């Protein structure tokens, strides 16, 4: 099991390694934007990784393309596309 901490809410949840980040965040009881139902097309589920970006699965070419189109800051990921590999802390402006 690995821990997903969501700041600044202070909420955290334990999930199996490899679990989708979006599921982990929602199971922590936090909202996550989405208009594409997790298809990696809208970018509303963007979160920022605090710490080691290697705690999440690397972005695939489609995610990289959308993040580039959105001019995402370094460390930002699509929660619907990223999988949790090791314990991680993420943040969103609306938590
Ligand atoms: S929910 Fe649309 S990109 Fe993640």
Image: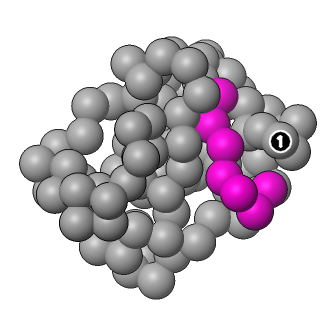
Looking at the image, how many numbered discs can be counted on the residues?
A: 1
Packing grade of label 1 (10 A; few <14, some 14-19, many >=20) is few
Residue 6 in sight: yes
What is the secondary structure assignment of the residue under circle 1? Answer: loop
Pinpoint residue 70: horizontal percent, then vertical percent: 32, 66
Q: Which residue is mark 1?
A: 8
Q: Residue at x 32, y 30 (%)?
A: 57
The chosen color scheme is: one colour
- Picture quarter with the N terminus: top right
Q: Residue at x 47, y 30 (%)?
A: 84
Query: Residue lying furthest left in this view?
Result: 61
Frontmost residue, 39 versus 1: 39
Q: In the rendered view, does 81 fall on the left or right side of 29?
A: left
Find out if the beta carbon at label 1 lies less than 8 Å from the nearest ligand 1 atom.
no
Q: Is residue 44 above or below residue 73?
A: below
Pinpoint residue 76: horizontal percent, then vertical percent: 44, 45
- Picture quarter with the C terminus: bottom right
Q: Is residue 8 above or below residue 37?
A: above
The quarter holding residue 59 reads: top left
Q: Is residue 25 above or below residue 56?
A: below
Q: In the rendered view, does 66 fall on the left or right side of 47?
A: left
Q: Is residue 43 magenta?
A: no
Task: Give, as a single range, the part of the protein colored magenta.
Answer: 89-95
Q: Is residue 90 magenta?
A: yes
Q: Residue at x 63, y 37 (%)?
A: 90
Residue 20 in sight: no
Query: Residue lying furthest bottom in this view?
Result: 35
Query: Residue lying furthest right in this view?
Result: 10
């Amino acid at each position: 099991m690995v821990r997903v901490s969501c700041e600044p809410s202070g909420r955290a949840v334990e999930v199996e390694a490899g679990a989708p980040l979006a599921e982990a965040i929602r199971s922590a009881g936090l909202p996550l934007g989405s208009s594409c139902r997790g298809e990696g097309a809208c970018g509303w589920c963007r979160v920022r990784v605090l710490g080691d970006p290697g705690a999440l699965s690397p972005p695939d070419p489609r995610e990289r393309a959308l993040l580039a189109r959105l001019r995402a800051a370094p460390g930002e990921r699509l929660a619907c596309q990223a999988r949790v590999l090791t314990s991680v802390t993420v943040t969103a402006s609306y938590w």
